[in-house]
Structure formats: structure tokens, C-alpha cells
Image (spheres, rainbow, N blue to C red):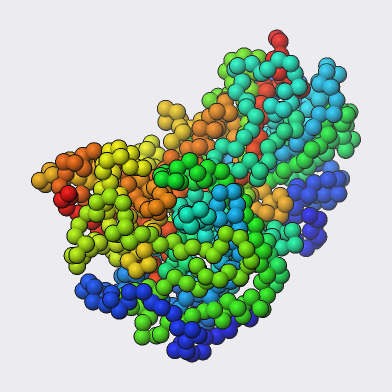
Amino acid sequence: MNRRRFLQTTAVAGSIGTAGCLESLGLGDDDSSSDVPRPGGYGDDAPLVQDPPQAAYIPTHREGMVMPGAVRAGEYAVGPMVSQHHPFWLVTGETVEPVEVQPEDSVHLMITVWDPETRTVLPSDEGLSIEIYRDGDPIEELSPWSMLSQSMGVHFGDNVPLDGDGTYEIQVTVPPIGTDKTGSFEGRFEESATATFEFTFDQAFRDTVFDRIAMVDEENWGVRGAIEPGGGMDGEMDGAGGPGPIPFSELPPSEALPGALLGDPSADDFPKSSDDAAVPATIVDGESRFGSDPYLLVSPRTPYNRNPLPATALTAVLEENGDFVAETPLEATLDDETGLHYGAAMPELASADTVTIVVDAPPQTARHQGYETAFIDMDDIEYEIDL
Amino acid sequence: MSLPDPDAVPRRQFLRAAVATGGAAALSACLGLDDETTGELSRPAGVDDPASLPARQHAWDDTLATDDDGNLVPPKHHVLLELSLTAEPDETAREQVESALQELESALEWSPDGLLFTMGYTPAYFGRFEEPLPESVDLPEPTTLTELESESEVGFDDYDALVHLASDHASVVLAAEQALLGKREELNGDPLGQSFDGVFERHGRRTGFVGPGLPREKSEEIDIGTDPEHIPEESPFFMGFRSGFARSQAGEDRVTIEEGPFAGGTTEHVESLGLQLRTWFEQDSQHQRVSKMFSPEHAQEERVGEFGEQLGADSGITEEIAARAPEDSRTEGVVGHAQKAARAREDGQPQLLRRDFNTIDDDEPGVHFLSLQENISQFVTTRRAMAGEDLTDGAVGRRLNNGILQYIRVERRGNYLVPPREQRALPNSNPSN
């Protein structure tokens, strides 16, 4: 593969928006560097921020992508995105390990799965499987990682070796979703479905991907913040027709969550933050799609783009006057209006004055550049219940 | 797949390719290496009196060697011969099948230096009889067992019978297969008069190998998707770790059917899997691999070593570690494969006797996961424990950080009744005494 060098790091192929970076400067005093390991060779194609802060930070660029076109498969809409191979990080507990680009890797293949009716991205790791063929010959078979990216949101992906230039067929099988589902999602997504795409890997493809790489001004590299979603999301597709464009996986703003919001929206530290994740919480009372008991709804998200944080283990501890009242693990739940949140029915909410959200394990989803140093070492979040 | 040039590759590599290819040409070429003078097998002879052999077809363990830690060493080479019945299972056919099997037993010693084998029958085979199987036999039709398997993708074994041939010598399993198919006139110096020809025809075959050094050698013959050097030289399995520890295996007694007309038999499940070794070796670190294969505690306390050399006759999966799977899925963000499977132990005892082996069938790295248990339901319970679908409420996903599920794909499943030796030839579904 003909790799091209990035000769000028300050040349901007098309400047891209950065969300919240200027507003975020000065939030928090701790700009300590993260000690998450950096990968070694990434080729000469695109740099990495070498000394990022322990927070969501603006990367050096947004990857260029080709989108072969979304299709419906069963109840799902499935959209592939293909970009240049690039490093990412795997999370196991609180250990973050880099995945190096390998010489045989050809592309980074990503899949977004969403509900075509509500255009809500479905982020749960239910175990997609991908089979890649060329002229009917099997080339690669893999289960992609659950991943989190500033520009591509929640998706599934991996670096994949191909077998030279040619036209490839990709089959993606989406299993039934076992995560709890509420609202109009209840009873849906209970069958697996397979979607098939084609894309051509050749010099024209590589040129397009390269041309679509959008560099960030170097002065913003590593600054707390995030690049805006884009590069084709919610925009033009390369392929024709289907249920596209691919929606971005943003959650509703805190104020739009159902129920009574905990904490004071006018306060500086609202919503409360844990290792840079924003963690608003509400209590949904009375009869609701979550049941008839008071329901604690916790909606952790990335601080700028409001991406959901999947694969997280949370427990809620209730207290009154400093005394323990109750403790419950929170269940990951997919709701058509709220998206992915973590919740539990807790009748004891009526008598508690404090809820502490304990992070048993931070989001285990793999991270793209800009998210690998945040949402790892997550302290408890405490809200007063004052309703 | 064609055979490599025997002069160009090391002997062991050639033998394994021969087993995978099968056929008379493979066998002749294979035999040429085994005995340069006569071109025939020269293995220990079998018995004159078949009654002297164990009553259980699956009684192999007494013949196996043990390693330095006291674990049983499985035979190195395996063939699974899939058979379809082409004649009525009447008395004539029964006698022919029994004779053919007895000829194997008289030609070759019942040991890994000779030949070990079992013959099992599918629910489809028994479905041809009017009477159902007795209640003492739990043999359902194979189905998908977990949410990750879809009906359209997994194949089910619905032919009639499966012969599992095993030996430390590739030439033996190949020759035995040929003998059963009626393609040989002698075996290990004994003339052959009988075969399955006319009663069974070959529906298909699967092959494999297991033992220290073999996966690494074999990985150099096909494209396993990653550099073979990732597999530790001494690893007996493709994924790089020892398995089959003495204390993690049920004994033969435990998996034997206790009552009814098939007492002394066992049930057999064969799950054929493909392996995704590229991501396993190139993306996960050793720490992550140990966490996912054993448990997060094993990784944190560095109990395993490079390929399990630090584990003796015990995987180290205690009841406490198994019981901690739900908690680990929340607090560690990962659960181990062995940790999950051990939850299916009964009274602290494993229910399965695993005789699995690696494969490069279809030029892809995989495992034929063959398990013996008294009831198929015990396999199902253990396989579901291993799938850990009940552990996905927190940080662990259905594949993400959930044991080794990210790296395996189920391709086929089959259930078999392996009758006691006296019922092994075309049994009725409910034989009278």
C-alpha cells in the first residue's frame, strides 16, 4: 500500500470544528498528564498527541472515511465506515493498553448499528460478527471491538488486514439485543440479522480517505475538548439509498432527561463529573415506562459530544443523615428517548437525602485518540436528593 | 490441500499434513517415512480376545501417559470419521460393523502407541427406529446453545455415526480410517476381511492434533492470520495455554451412563470452532489474555506464566474464583473463560471429560471441542456457564472482556451416544438384553 507522508502538520485540509474547547479551558485545575501508554509506530501518516492530559482532549486530526452505504437488516439499520488503519486502546478494568497498527493492516473498519425508526444508535456490546470476502473467498472473520470516538461516536470496529486491491464483500451479523429495553424499544431487537456491503479497496479509495483527513490546528492538539462529530456522519453518504445517513450517537442534554434532575443546573460543577465524564442523574417518579417505583436514572456521557458510555458497571448507594439506606447495582438500559443509561427502581429513594454513584468498572469499550486518557480512574459521584 | 514435498519439510510437519489430507496417497507417503524397509505400519499388535478389552468404548485413560505434573497426555493425532448409513441396520449389517471394529482391535494395541477409538451415533440415526431412546439416555438433537450462534450459520451433525480415531502416530489414524472404508487389505501386518463398505459411506471427516509444540509447528503450514511465533513453542493448543489439567477434568466413571440398556456408555458433544488468533495475539497483551482465559486474579497474581507452565495439575480456578465471576464482571471489568466454566461444577467436581484438539481443516485454525459427559444436558449447562450471558449486566459485554468469546466462532455442533462396547455396532434405540 502506498502510504503518503504528512509533510506539513500545520497545513489544514479543511478546518474542522472543535466542540467546547475554548469554554473548557480553565475547567478544573488539574492538567496533569496521563500515563496511558502511547503506541509506537503509527507510520508517518498522522501523528498522535504525545503528552495528553488526563481528560478528553482534542486529537491531532479527524480520520478520513468512506461510507459504502447503510442497509436495513431485520429491525436494525447498519452502516459501515472505512478509514485508514489507526491505533486505538483496549480497556480491561482500569488498565488501558494500546493496539498498534500492524504492517498487514489495511483499513480500520467500523460499523454503526441504529434503530431506523427513532434514529437512535444502539451501542450495547452484544457481539457483532463480521465476515469479509473477496470474489467469494473468505479473507477475514472477526468480532469487532465496542469502540468510542469523538467524531464517530459509539460504534464497533477494528483494524483489518485485506488481501490486496479489489472489491470486498462485508457481512455483518447483529445478534439480538439482550440489554434491558424500555419505551418503544421494549420487545424489539430480539432477532439476529445480517447486513451485506461492498466496497472497493484501491488507490482511488486510499486517495479519498487521505484527502478527507482533516487536521486540527496544532495549537489545539491535546487541549481539553473534542472535535465535532462529522466527516460524513449525518451528512452525505458515499453509497446510495438505504436508511442512511448514519446518525451520531449523542444523548439528550441533561435538562432533557426524563424525571427530576438531581443537583443544581446553575452550579459550576453541573453536571457532576468523574474523570471527565459528565454524569447527570434524575429520579423518575410515579408511573413511567420504567415502572411504578421511583427510578434512579444515571446518564453518563462524554463531556463535549454527549456520547453514551457503554460497558460501565455502576452501583447506587442511598443514605439518609449519613446512615446507609440501600444499595443497588444499576442496569444498563436502552430507551428510545433517553438512549443508553444506567438505572434501577429504588423505592428507598423516597426516604434518602444523598445518592452516591459508585463506578465499579469504568467504560470497558475501546477508545479512539482523544478518549483514551479519560473515563478510567473514576471517583464516586454524589448528589443530594432535594426534591 | 495437497501434500508438501516430503524432502522439503520436517518429518513431523509432513505427517500432520498427511493426516489432514487423508487418502491412500497420503498414507503411502506417510508410511514411507515411518518404516523405510517395508512401507507398513509396525506398531504394537492388538488382542486376540476382544472380551479382554474394556467394556467402555471411552476407557482410554488407563492407557495414557502422564506428564511431569501428573496430567494425562492425550493422543497426538485425531480423525473424526463422519458416516452415513447406506444399508438397513439389520443383524447382517450389525455383524459386519462389529467385525470391522474387532479387526482394528486385533491389529493394533489399545493404547496411544497403537489405536484408540470410539463409535457414536446421532439422534438422527436413532430416529429411524420406532422406539425412542430410553430415559436413561439424554441425547437431544443439536441446537444453538447461546445467543451468539445463529441457526443459519451453525451446522448440525445429522448424519448417522462418528468414529473418533486417535493415536500418537499419524500413520495409524490414517490407516485405520482407510481400513474402515474398505480401502486396505492389511493393517499392521494383519490381513483385513471386513470393513464398513456396503453399510456406511463416508459423509465427511475432520482431523486434528494436540500436544506441546504441535500448534506452533502446524501454524507454519497455513496462514493462521498472525505470525506463528506468537504461539509459545511448548503450547499444546493454538491459543497458547495448557489445558486439560487433571483436576479440571471429570474422570471416566463420572461421565459413564449408569443405568439402562446403554449403561457403560457415554454421551459425546462435538463443537467445531474457528479461532481469531490475530486479534488475540496482536491486540491483547499477555495480561489481558491471561485474564480472559483464566481469571483476572490469575493475571494480577501472575500465576500462569507464559503458557501455563506454572500451573501443575490444576488450573488454579478455585470455587472462590468461580463464585466471584459476577463480582469480577463488575469490579474488574473482565471475566475469565475457565472461571466461568467452573461455575458448572457439581459439588466442586467438573462434569465434562474434554478430549478436544486443534485443527487446520479448511486451512483455518480451529478447535474440535469434543466432550464426554453422562448427559448432554451437562454439556449444555457448562457451555452456558462458559458463555457468561448472565454476567453482562455491568461492564462485561456479550463478547467484550467476556472470556474468550471475542475470538471464537461456533461452526458446527453434534450430539452422539457412545454405547458401551457390546452395543457399539448399529444399536437399536432400545436394545433388549
Residue A349 percent coordinates (x, y): 21, 43
Q: Quadrant of the C terminus of chain B?
A: top right
Q: Is residue A67 left or right of residue B112?
A: left
Q: Nearer the viewer, residue B72 or B151?
A: B151
Query: Residue at point 71% right, 55% down?
Result: B363
Q: Position of residue A301 (x, y in %)?
A: 34, 60
Is B330 rendered above or below residue B191?
Answer: below
Whether residue A147 is visible: no
- Residue B13 image point, x, y percent: 72, 55
The image shows residue B218, relative to residue A87, as above or below, that is: above
Residue B72 visible in the current orientation: yes
Total marks in image: 0
Q: Tell me if residue B163 comes above or below residue A233 in the rendering.
A: above
Residue placed furthest toward the left: A321
Comparing A299 with A252, the one in front is A252
Q: Horizontal placement of B328 versus B72: left or right?
A: left
Task: Name the residue: 27% across, 57% down.
Answer: A280
Residue found 62% across the figure and 63% down from its top: A241
Q: Position of residue B231 (x, y in %)?
A: 57, 58
Residue B186 shown left or right of residue A312 in the figure: right
Q: Is residue B247 above or below residue A77?
A: above
Quadrant of the image containing the N terminus of chain B? bottom right
A229 vs B215, nearest the viewer = A229
Q: At x 28% / y 46%, what residue is drawn?
A: A284
- Furthest residue toward top: B433
